[in-house]
Image: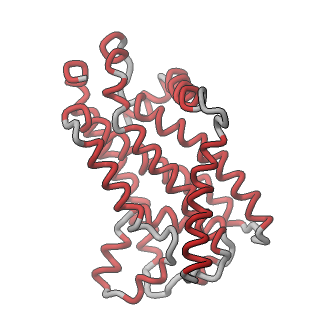
Amino acid sequence: MTLLNDLWRYRELAVKLASKDIKVRYKHPILGFLWALLVPISMILIFSFIFSVLLKAPNDGVPFVAYISTAIFPWTFFQLAIGNSVTCVVDSGSLIKKVYFPRELIPVSIVLANLVNFVLSLILLILALRFLHIGWSWHLMALPFIIFLHLMLTTGLALWVSALQVEFRDMKYMVEIALVLWFYLVPVFYPISIIQHYSLPVVFLYLMNPMVGMVTFYRWALLPGYTSLLPDSIPWIGFVTYTFIASIVILMIGVRVFKKRQSVFADLV
């Protein structure tokens, strides 16, 4: 794939751009990198209080803090990577007009910068689960593959929206609204088993959301015994296969859209 070739050929530039994004983002705040943890942790505490204490919501048989944490951190990575990448090409207009380099490195570097924060957060989460008396299983070995799958999906969408933003400046606001709506279509604070009460077409449509698969995969890897709590009515082999294929397809579409439109970037940014 051309994207992989460009990333390998210009890997040093990609690393420098990602490093620059991290440094700029946390240079001035007093707490620096800690904000990458405090924001999702705040969401976890708020949702835990509302749904675990006030509403007594079901949580698929695991501590609610652990249940929601295994979804909030992956979602935060996805949301920040997409949200930050929307305007990255437009914001890099002066650089694009001066120097030639694969333009896709700009949104990819944004995703990589957020990936660094996510991986560090994930390591801390794995350690924190021990304090919640949640053991580790061999499923953790699948975590690198799940992260890679998540990365493909996120990168594809980042390329897509950043390219469209150059020509359609309303894309930023559309993405903001879409991410808010998308959050509630992912089983972050409610159990996925709740969908078995709906008709088969509704269940099928719900499972077509690739982020549903991502969150489920992370919980499968991080929460031992989680699989036994999932509804038997869902065709899991097909669900896993679909999520895998959907991530690849979205990445390919994102690359294609970006490549097709990058010829006009210098004239429009």
Q: Which quadrant is the C terminus positioned in?
A: top left
What scheme was used to colour the molecule? secondary structure
- Relative to 181, residue 56 above or below: below
Question: Which residue lies at the image location 59% right of the left edge and 47% below the top edge?
Answer: 118
Residue 141 in picture, x, y percent from top left: 67, 59
Question: Which residue lies at the image location 41% right of the left edge and 62% below the top edge?
Answer: 183
Query: Looking at this view, is 18 or 147 the one in front?
Result: 18
Query: Looking at this view, is 2 or 75 the one in front?
Result: 75
Residue pushed farthest front?
Answer: 54
- Relative to 130, residue 262 above or below: above
Q: Quadrant of residue 71?
A: bottom right
Q: Quadrant of residue 254?
A: top left
Residue 62 in picture, x, y percent from top left: 66, 78
Question: In the figure, is residue 69 to the left or right of 14?
Answer: right
Residue 142 in picture, x, y percent from top left: 62, 60
Q: Which quadrant is the N terminus positioned in?
A: top left
- Relative to 117, residue 17 above or below: above
Query: Looking at this view, is 54 or 78 the one in front?
Result: 54
Residue 37 in picture, x, y percent from top left: 63, 48
Residue pushed farthest top?
Answer: 98
Question: In the figure, is residue 187 to the left or right of 61?
Answer: left
Query: Looking at this view, is 155 or 129 the one in front?
Result: 129
- Relative to 89, residue 116 above or below: below
Question: Which residue lies at the image location 47% right of the left edge and 76% below the top edge?
Answer: 236
Total labels: the figure holds 0
Question: Which residue lies at the image location 40% right of the left edge and 44% below the top edge?
Answer: 83
